[in-house]
């Protein structure tokens, strides 16, 4: 017997002991979940189709893992504007093992509470948890993480004004932070970009002006 279920806006054909990957559901590995959006159930001539779902039918499953999908890259470019932006994305997923299919009158879950119910906390419990958490320090409150900073340039400092969007004032600010060379900017990670953005007070300028690619080009020219 198999069932057709719907979760995360997608439909899946499942049978007992199958493993499927779906959009992220609340819960941890080992938790039981109940999927009650059953569109069809049965097999062959006994196949029953809902309109759109079958009342009382349900599929029980166990959360195996909470991974993320393979990273995809999203590249945006504006023609003749010198604007390029590259972002990465990893979709949140849940791996489920199908335990049982119930045509009607599904029994209550006994091992663990359903993930949906577990995710819901009373307002008082949420407030207590929030009070128990220590307040973040001023350093932790700032987004991102710092890049490799220098107390002084290694040899002669690079002319950072060659990077589009960097003027004398911005170059001075970067130097005060400990950024003197193209290679430092070329090695920025997304977390380091966020950290520098926070201190420059020009949110998004590094990505908007594509400083990293410019710095890579300038560094290569310097070495050549």
Image (cartoon, rainbow, N blue to C red):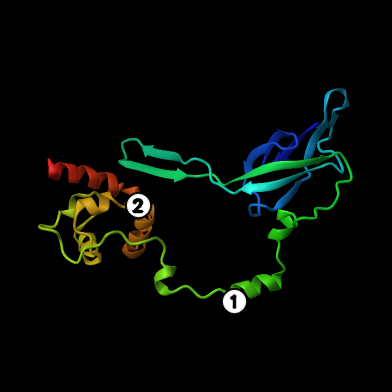
**Residue 90 rendering spot, x and y as whole percentages:** 50, 44
Name the residue nearer the viewer: 18 or 115: 18
Location of the C terminus by quadrant is top left
174 relative position to 88: left or right: left
Which residue appears at 66% of the width and 54% of the height?
A: 27
3 relative position to 149: left or right: right
Which residue appears at 68% of the width and 59% of the height?
A: 119
| In the rendered image, the vertical position of residue 6 relative to residue 121, given as above or below | above
Which mark is first along the chain, 2 or 1?
1
Q: Is residue 165 visible?
A: no
**Residue 137 rendering spot, x and y as whole percentages:** 43, 74
Q: SS at mark 2?
A: loop
Using the image, tell me which numbered label, if any, was put on residue 27. Answer: none
Residue on which the image places disc 1: 131
Q: CA distance from mark 1 to mark 2?
A: 33 Å
Q: Is residue 197 visible?
A: yes
Which residue appears at 35% of the width and 55% of the height?
A: 193
In the image, farthest residue toward the top: 45
Quarter occupied by residue 156: bottom left
Name the residue nearer the viewer: 46 or 120: 46
Residue on which the image places disc 2: 189
The crowding category of the residue bearing disc 1, from other C-alpha atoms within 10 Å (few below 14, some 14 to 19, many at least 20), is: few
188 relative position to 60: left or right: left
Name the residue nearer the viewer: 39 or 194: 39
């Amino acid at each position: 017997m198999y069932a057709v279920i719907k979760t995360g806006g997608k439909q899946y054909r499942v049978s007992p002991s199958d493993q499927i990957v779906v959009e992220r559901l609340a819960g941890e590995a080992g938790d039981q979940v109940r999927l009650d959006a059953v569109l069809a159930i049965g097999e062959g001539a006994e196949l029953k189709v809902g309109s759109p779902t079958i009342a009382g039918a349900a599929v029980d499953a166990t959360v195996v893992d909470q991974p993320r999908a393979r990273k995809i890259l999203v590249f945006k470019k504006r023609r003749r504007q010198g604007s390029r932006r590259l972002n990465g994305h990893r979709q949140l997923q849940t791996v489920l093992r199908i335990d049982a299919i119930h045509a009607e009158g599904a029994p209550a879950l006994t091992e663990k509470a359903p993930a949906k119910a577990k995710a819901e906390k009373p307002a008082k419990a949420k407030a207590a948890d929030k009070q128990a958490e220590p307040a973040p320090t001023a350093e932790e409150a700032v987004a991102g993480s710092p890049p490799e900073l220098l107390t002084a340039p290694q040899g002669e400092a690079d002319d950072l004004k060659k990077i589009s969007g960097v003027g004398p004032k911005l170059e001075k600010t970067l130097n005060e932070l400990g950024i003197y060379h193209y290679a430092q900017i070329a090695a920025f990670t997304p977390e380091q970009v966020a950290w520098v953005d926070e201190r420059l007070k020009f949110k998004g300028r590094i990505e908007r002006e594509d400083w990293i690619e410019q710095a890579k080009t300038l560094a290569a020219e310097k070495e050549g």
